[in-house]
Amino acid sequence: MFSITNIIAMENLPVIKTEKLIKSFPMGKGQFTALKGIDLTFSQGEFAGLIGPSGSGKTTLLNIIGSLDTPTSGDVMVLERHIGHLSAKESAMLRKQSLGFIFQSYNLLAVHTVYENVEFPLLLLKYGALERRRMVMDALEWVGLTDKQKSKPPQLSGGECQRVAIARAMVKRPSVVLADEPTANLDADNSHNILRTMEKLNRELNTTFLFATHDDKVKSYLRRKIYLVDGLVVNDEISAN
Amino acid sequence: MKLAIKLAFRNLMGAGLRTWLNAIVLSFSFVVIIWMKGIMAGWDHQSKNDMARWEIGGGQYWQEKYDPYDPFTWRESHAPIPVRFKDEIRSGDMVPVLVTQGSIYPQGRIQSIKIKGIDPDQKLLLLPTQKLDTTMTDAIPAVIGSITSRDLKMGVGDRATLQWRDANGTFDASDVLITGVFKVSVPSADQGQIYIPLAKLQSMLGLPGEATILTYRDSKQLRPDVTGWINKPVKVLTASIDEMLKMKSTGQSILYFILLLLAMLAIFDTQVLSIFRRQKEIGTYIALGYTRKEVVGLFTVEGTMHSVFAALLGAAYGLPLLLYQAKHGWTLPIDASQFGVAIAQTLYPVYSAGLVVATVMLVMLTTALVSYLPSRRIAKMNPTEALRGRIQ
């Protein structure tokens, strides 16, 4: 049996595709347009970033791709699903099965241990206890936190918290990981560690990584850099490495 | 659901003291409601039981004119004991009682009194009628209850003049000697009443073979209709107790309501605060694959779980407390006989499985509702704003 990810990889279909994407928000009596017609396509295994200053629309775009928000007009396809047409249940299912999220402020569940935080997506997917254990331990090994599995987030450093967040995003082997300013709260050493971990996972698991960032450290790792200014793509660079 | 329970449990345990404070408050509601309901059930059980054993047996036939609340009917309310009951009376399964109005003159005072003639050999009722031994005294032997004894200021061995009117309306009087004083929790078997031998009263009134009340033992036996007599089954005779307990229950319900309200306020407050403080967590649940409705469900389960903890906590300290009460009873701090209602000095609560289950269900459902109401707000939240922890 083939998953949608297998089919996309075999047919060389884009994992994410946006067409004439516009997103507006009500502001006072008028409207603020955060995205003004975005056309982008991402393939499986890309390590790409949306780069731009605050207010350029990168987080908005990431949220729509992550089916946490809907477009005002235009089309967004993620893993062959039209985001604008999904019901609440369908978009939850898409996030649950195929998308991983990494946030600037980690968003870990504070009262849960590291192990329980990483286990959470697998509980939602109803994996059996043994399989869950194996997958969580694998994920913790990827990020080098097997010795911290019983700790709770308040006992960890920022870098460790973000590594837990990466493990939580990766544990279910999603097709796409969306990372919103993942290094914004980290020092340089931790930022490089995190980025190296993500780059390694991208290469080993062929997971598509899409960042929203304005951090130069992140830029140096990206193989594709999409520059956004005022809701428009102003440059789309693909590097050779 | 299983996952929601698991997560709710983890979240509540993680919340620490806040969870336990809510659970403690809620557990008071559990214990107090069960205790008070138990007292009511015990009171109901004791009153009816005592009434049956001291006054009404398994039911009564009343002479059709008899009205216990109208003393003017008492002189008229008598009739020959129906022949069909002779065997039942002989076997001790029915006790005839003749009732009339009279006056008693203790220490020169005059007090109105209900005179009841009863067979000294009867065993159906717990009244100490064996003390009505006519051979021991020249006066009329009489037994009275402790309330009457207190009111008349008379005890065993005291004498007083008893006055009555016979069937022809002629006044007559004689001395009575108190041969026994009994203590009973049923005021209607005591207050303002004096018991003398049936045969003596029949002869005093000139009504041989007549009675006002026929008390029978077997409440389950189908009783025949008898001309001139009205059958009063136990249910009818105890209706006043049911009515009184119903009234008391209503009063108690107000107390439960206040108790529950306090506990629910604590839960509601916690829920509102949780939703306010945990916006980021709510956003994270949604990002990880929960629908907003599922998050509402999770928070509702979390709130409701307080009542599960409260039930366990309540069981831990409430069970020994309630069992102790059930065994040793609850003694009223003031003289119960002054209440004027059928209430024992020491009440023994009765806790049934139904009472416990119903209370647990009531508290759980109320908690679920109170937890759900503020959680509905989550359904209106914008997940992207929630993820950033922005107050919505």
Image (cartoon, rainbow, N blue to C red):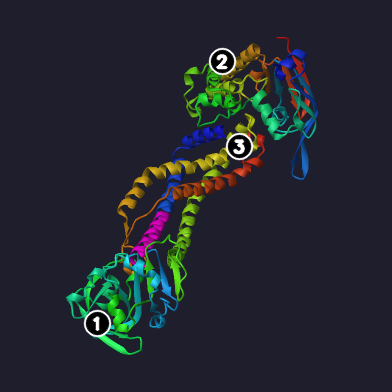
**Where B388 falls versus A218 (above or below)?**
below
Of callouts 3 and 1, the N-terminal one: 1
B76 left or right of B142 in image: right
- Report if residue A178 is visible in the image: no
Residue A73, quarter of the rendered image: top right
Disc 1 crowd, CA 10 A, few/some/many (<14, 14-19, 20+) = some
Q: State the CA–CA distance, disc 3 to disc 1.
A: 79 Å
- Report if residue A55 is visible in the image: yes
The disc numbered 2 marks a residue on which chain?
Answer: A
Disc 3 crowd, CA 10 A, few/some/many (<14, 14-19, 20+) = many
Please name the amino acid that badge 3 sits on: Val
Please name the amino acid that badge 1 sits on: Pro
> What residue span does the magenta drawing correspond to?
B36-56
Q: Which mark is residue A142?
A: 2
Q: Is residue B40 magenta?
A: yes
**Towards the viewer: B99 or B38:** B99
Q: Is residue B8 magenta?
A: no
